[in-house]
Amino acid sequence: MSITVVSFFLGCSSDSKTHSGDSLSPENQPISDTLTDDGIVKTDKNYFIRESSRPEMLVVGKSFETTPESIKTLIIGMNRALLDDISSQKAIINGAITVIYDKMPVEKEKQNIWVGIPLNKPLKAWNSLKVPAQDYYKVQTNSALGETLPFWKSVSTDLADKVSNNKKTWYLEMPSSSVNAEMTSEITNCNLFISK
């Protein structure tokens, strides 16, 4: 069960479409106001934005009417029960723990926040939310899951003229992982996804 717990928190959020410049880390990116090479939309000292696509996801979990500051508490509070049900119902984890906001997160502002894990099938006693396959602006931050609130305001300003107002905008937050010298996963940053 400890391996499942580790994979729950350290799941990898991969994109279905990558660009030739994806091997560049934020440290290797030139700092400038705007870049358009290989899908990179903007870089900043604390994050960079690039175009991305994600496949359809079935995210199994629960929704909460709460503030963005409570994300870590929500994850800790529900992880054991969700992991136990994933194991007992023989579901397959298809991605990292995912936080889905109804709207752009704002400090101390209550909204409907969905917390769950992408799975191959629904689970009894849990709700499911289908996130459609679509194009996103992927924002790679240097912050951990649940600590990205300072980035959302900056990102919303950077993308104000790019996000469509004609359809539902999806706001996702997912951890990203990397492998260290001992070949074990470690969370190095958190990705924000805002649908185009």
Image (tube, rainbow, N blue to C red):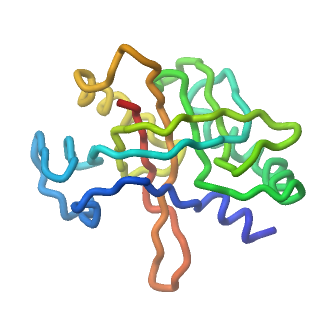
Q: Residue at x 49, y 51 (%)?
A: 144
The quadrant of the picture occupied by the N terminus is: bottom right
> On the picture, is 148 further left or further right than 78?
left
> On the picture, is 148 further left or further right than 185?
left
Question: Total label count?
Answer: 0
Considering every residue shown, the one lying at the far top of the view is: 166
Q: Residue at x 20, y 42 (%)?
A: 42
Which x, y percent locates residue 40? 21, 47
Q: Residue at x 33, y 57 (%)?
A: 18
Which x, y percent locates residue 32? 10, 46
Q: Could you say which quadrant of the image residue 146 lies in?
A: top right
187 is higher (above) or lower (below) than 89: below
Give 142 or 15, whichever is nearer the viewer.
Answer: 15
Give 4 or 78, whichever is nearer the viewer.
Answer: 4
Q: Residue at x 50, y 41 (%)?
A: 173
Which x, y percent locates residue 95? 59, 54
183 is higher (above) or lower (below) than 33: below
Give 83 or 73, whichever is nearer the viewer.
Answer: 83
> On the picture, is 124 further left or further right than 44?
right
107 is higher (above) or lower (below) than 53: above
Which x, y percent locates residue 22? 28, 61
